[in-house]
Every structure is written in C-alpha cells, then in structure tokens.
Amino acid sequence: MIGHVSLHVNDFQKSKEFYTKSLAPLGYVMVLEFAEWSVAGFGEPAKPDFWIRADGADKPGHVAFTATSKQQVEGFHAAAVGAGGKDNGAPGYRKEYSPGYYAAFVVDPDGHNIEVVYFDPAPPTA
C-alpha cells in the first residue's frame, strides 16, 4: 500500500491545473493547498495521497494510479492529453507486465511519467 506520493514540480500553477483536470476522471480532487509553500494535495475528500510541491523538478519520476475500470484509464488519458500532457502510451493491455494489466501513460509538464492502471480480472485471451 502507498500512503502518499509527492512530485517536485517547476511551475506550481501549471502543474496544479494539469493534475486537477487529469485526475478528475479517477475521482481525485484537490483536497488541500498550502499556497505559502506551493504545495497541493489531491485525493478523496479528507484523504490526499498525491502531492505536488514547487521546489524544482530535478529529474522525472513515475507514479501509477489504480483505476477501477478500463473507462477510467481511457478517461485519464484523454483528460491528461487534453490538459497538455504528452502521450507516452495509449490505453491498452500491457501483457509484458501481466495478462490483465490495462494501462495508459502520459508525461506531465515536468517530464514525470504518469500511469493509470486497471487490473482486469477477465482479460481477453487472444
């Protein structure tokens, strides 16, 4: 289990807008913001588990969010690309990871590889 993940970003406002739009299909909202520190937490109400902090992005990171359906994976990908992210892997099965691994990848404004994955209990066999 992951308690929370934090990414260091260069442009707080740009990243805040990107994640507000990109994570909406997963039910994430901005839960907390500490403007004086340029920190924002996203997640379910009262439970932020994804944080951004504007203190410079020295190197890209990778974060994977779990989806509850293929539609959520597809919704994330469309929203993230629409919000200015760069496609890094369209929604689809990644059999090299595991048979039911359905995921999409987008590079955010600071170069972080953001993934959303759905673990399909009944993936296609062909």
Image (spheres, rainbow, N blue to C red):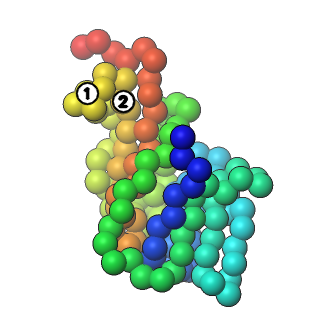
Q: How far apart are marks 2 and 1 (CA)?
A: 7 Å
* Viewer-closest of 116 and 56: 56
**43 or 85, nearer to the observer:** 43
Q: Can you say whether 10 is above or below 83 in the image?
A: below
Q: What residue type is labelled 2?
A: Tyr
Residue 76 lies, in percent from the top left, at: 49, 48
Which residue is under mark 2?
Answer: 101
Compared with residue 12, is residue 120 higher up or lower down, i.e. above or below?
Answer: above
Looking at the rendered structure, the kind of residue marked 1 is: Lys
- Mark before the other along the chain sequence, 2 or 1: 1
**Picture residue at 37% right of the left edge, 18% below the top:** 123
Q: In this view, does 36 lie above or below 42?
A: below
- The answer to whether residue 75 shows anywhere in this view is no
Q: What element carries label 1?
A: loop
Q: In this view, does 35 lie to the left or right of 10?
A: right
Residue at the spot x=46%, y=73% of the render? 8
Quadrant where the N terminus lies? Answer: top right
- Where residue 119 sits, quadrant-wise, is top left
Discs 2, 1 touching: Cβ within 8 Å: yes
Return the residue at label 1: 95
Tell me, for residue 124, which label it has, or none.
Answer: none
Residue 116 appears in the figure: yes
**Nearer to us in this view, 48 or 13:** 48
Mark 2: secondary structure: strand
Residue shown at 45% from the left, 18% from the top: 121
Residue 39, image x and y in percent? Answer: 61, 76
Quadrant including the C terminus: top left
